[in-house]
Image (tube, rainbow, N blue to C red):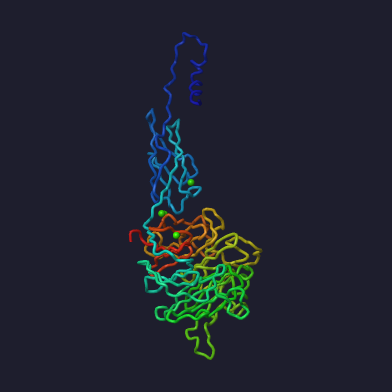
Amino acid sequence: MRRLFLICSILTLTACGGGGDSSSPVVLPPSGNSPPQITTAPSATVTENEFNVLTVRATDADGGGLSFSISGGDDADDFSIAGNGALRFVVTPNFELPTDADQDNVYQVTVQVSDGSASDTLDLTVTVNNDREGIGVRRLTTGLNDVTAIAKIPNQTKVFVTERGGNIYELDTIDGTRRLDRTLRNVNTTGEGGLLGLTVDPGFTANDTYWAFVTAQRSGPFGSAGSDITIRQINRNTSEGLLGTGTILEIEHDSDINYGGWLSFQGGNLYIGVGDAGVPANAGTPFSQLGKILRLTPNPDPFAGAAPVRFFIPADNPFLSQGGDPLVYAIGLQDPKNGFGFGDGFYFSDRGSSVAEEINFVSVTSEPFNFGWPQLEGIEPVMDSAGLSSSFPLTAYARGTGDREGSSIVGGAVYLGSVINLQGKYIFADRDSGKIWAVRNTDLEPGETLPSSRYELLNADFEPDAGSIDGIVAIGIDQENNLILADSDGEIFVVEPSGS
Ligand SMILES: [Ca+2]
Ligand SMILES: [Ca+2]
Ligand SMILES: [Ca+2]
Ligand SMILES: [Ca+2]
């Protein structure tokens, strides 16, 4: 309509005026410009890591030069277009971390072609497809029940896998065979309890000893209610007593939730992540062992003296001299789990209550830490936090059901295996949302909290050769730094280069 009106306006001076002298010569308008027309279809599909989308084609009846530009679309900033219509991504798209406005790997861009006076536009939808990027995921075994931990066995292509009910298996990460190593006695699986953590002794190769974090029926005569945490040192060549062998530490815990459940060695010391028992105030006071990371030094010769001495308290434990429980190393945690030794400390996850799930780092050499609970969840103050000096999580995501949310974090590992595209990434998961995420280790900086908008979603790249990865419940590595994943219905998978 607009064009007709324009023509009519030009003609008004001559023919359109109407009622003119019929003998006047009719002056034809100058031949009208026809606008260019885009002939390219409005949708395109590309594979991630490619710059080129397509070359937009247009015709113009008048011939002459056409110019292309990006004139709009939700994701206009992600694209550039050349003089010949070649449309490209400014940065190669990453399927795991899309940059389109709603982060669904479907990009919207409007391309305009102009002949100088008239134009045509195309609302183009560009769908980015996944590439596996050299990642293969192979199912190793099935039929496990409530896996809680995966522990590397040094110098072997095997890991220990624990079930909440008390079984410890040896799993070969090459051929997937597994063998029951032992079933722990006196394991209380009420609520969230059970065999929750396992790590091998630093001298494992010589002494065949591992350490377990187990909730057990309270051992004292008046202690029928509730369940305590036992830290057990277990020599694999000895059989276990009725109450559980080798308990070197009992931690009083009057609840059946928020046990924590991580233990690992570094520098000869044992670090133990203990939950707050559902009583947030426990976490904030150094007088309680709950909601803490504890640190002790096992005694290599506990029976040398008149009475057994199972462990020593490191002289620089922060509350040894300033009051508080001498075993406490770090405070302010709700449900610390899944520690992974890296550099001079550990990455670990801390489950949230209503606001956020966290990944934290605790150094074994720095000043004592307060991780903020119950004043902070993630970086959100949930109670008066005035005057609180605490370290923020390295990253946190909101509790919820959105794309980058969840409600049960499972800390993982910095990947150092042979899949190039995963190297240097910290890989973790959320059991409830089923998401498996990665962040570059170098993007995790103490004192800053990386937002969840930076998480790469690995689920498509982690599609297994058999079975399906349901909610991840434990992540570990083997001697070769292969990533080992256990899921909620008892399958275990290994991540390795595709085709291997
Ligand atoms: Ca990618
Ligand atoms: Ca989109
Ligand atoms: Ca991919
Ligand atoms: Ca499964």
Q: Residue furthest left?
A: 499
Above-or-below relation of 435 to 387? above
x, y (%) of residue 145? 47, 66
Pick the front one: 127 or 173: 173
Left or right for 154, reference 226? left
Q: For the C terminus, which image quadrant?
A: bottom left
Residue toward you, 377 or 310: 310
- Total labels: the figure holds 0
The structure residue drawn at horizontal position 44% and vertical position 82%, both measured from the top left corner, is 238
Q: Is residue 175 left or right of residue 298?
A: left
Residue 129 locus on image (x, y percent): 41, 49
Q: Residue 132 is drawn in which quadrant? A: bottom left
Question: In front here: 140 or 483?
Answer: 140
Q: Residue furthest bottom?
A: 306
**Residue at the location (57% across, 60% down)?**
356
Where does the image place residue 43, in percent across and percent down from the top left?
42, 41
Place of residue 355 in the rendered image (x, y in percent of width and height, measured from the top left): 59, 59
Out of 363 and 45, give the one closest to the viewer. Answer: 45
